[in-house]
Image (cartoon, grey):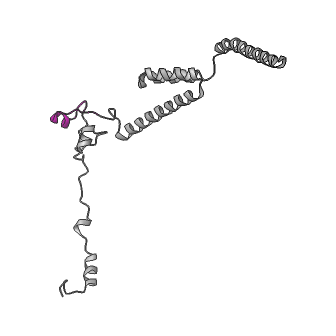
Amino acid sequence: MSASSLPLANRSAGQMGAPHRSQRSPERPRGKSKRTLIESACTACQKRKSRCDGQRPSCSRCKALHTDCEYNAEAGESRWSALRRKSNMLERERDEARELVAALHSRTESEAQDIYNRVRSSTFSDDMGALIQEVRDATSPRPRLQQQLRPHQQHQDASLHQLDWQQQHAQQSQ
């Protein structure tokens, strides 16, 4: 009886025991693989979805195509490590920006205007760290500044009190 004359159930059962060639895994030699892994591909090769050899400062494909070759990762740094580093940097910048906004909200109008003007006149990457440190250091009023304000404030309070007393006295005498 041929396999085609057998019922369908018997045909599949008879073939189940026989190994398929596609199920067997091909054996590879245990030597060095053909492809070498690189830590990170350049942005041009990533964009082209082509194999990058990772040569620095310019990979061989970018040299051959005369294109700019830039890497997001440092030499010896994996793509994921570079992304983690970039993420940490962005989180730090976000926290600093939030700290500046909080300082603008909590300061007097003149202090907030001073901070705002300094933010506008500085380059973000260079001067922002120093500006944030100054804002952190100035979280409490300086004692000398408090002493300078006190006599002036006391004089204002006394003047207002005297003016208020004069107005009340004038109303009573009428």
Highlighted magenta segment, given as a residue range: 55-70
Q: Is residue 167 left or right of residue 26?
A: right
Q: Find residue 130 and report its horizontal and vertical position in percent.
A: 49, 21
The image quadrant of residue 81 is: top left
Residue 174 is a magenta residue:
no
Instruction: Give the mark count.
Output: 0
Observer-nearest of 157 and 31: 157
Predominant SS along the magenta part: loop
State the quadrant of the C terminus. top right
Could you say where residue 53 lies in the image, as x and y percent from the top left?
23, 39
Pinpoint residue 64: horizontal percent, then vertical percent. 15, 35
93 to the left or right of 145: left
Foreground of the two, 4 or 69: 69
Residue that protrudes farthest toward the right in the picture: 173
Residue 151 in picture, x, y percent from top left: 71, 11
| The quarter of the displayed image where residue 78 is located | top left
Q: Dividing the image into 4 quarters, which one contains the N terminus?
A: bottom left
Looking at the image, residue 82 sits to the left or right of residue 141; the answer is left
Compared to residue 13, the image places residue 58 above or below, namely above
Question: Which residue in the rendered view is the most extreme toward the left?
Answer: 64
| Residue depicted at x 40% and y 35% | 86
At a point 22% along the width and 67% down the height, the residue shown is 21
Residue at 24%, 70% (x, y): give it.
20
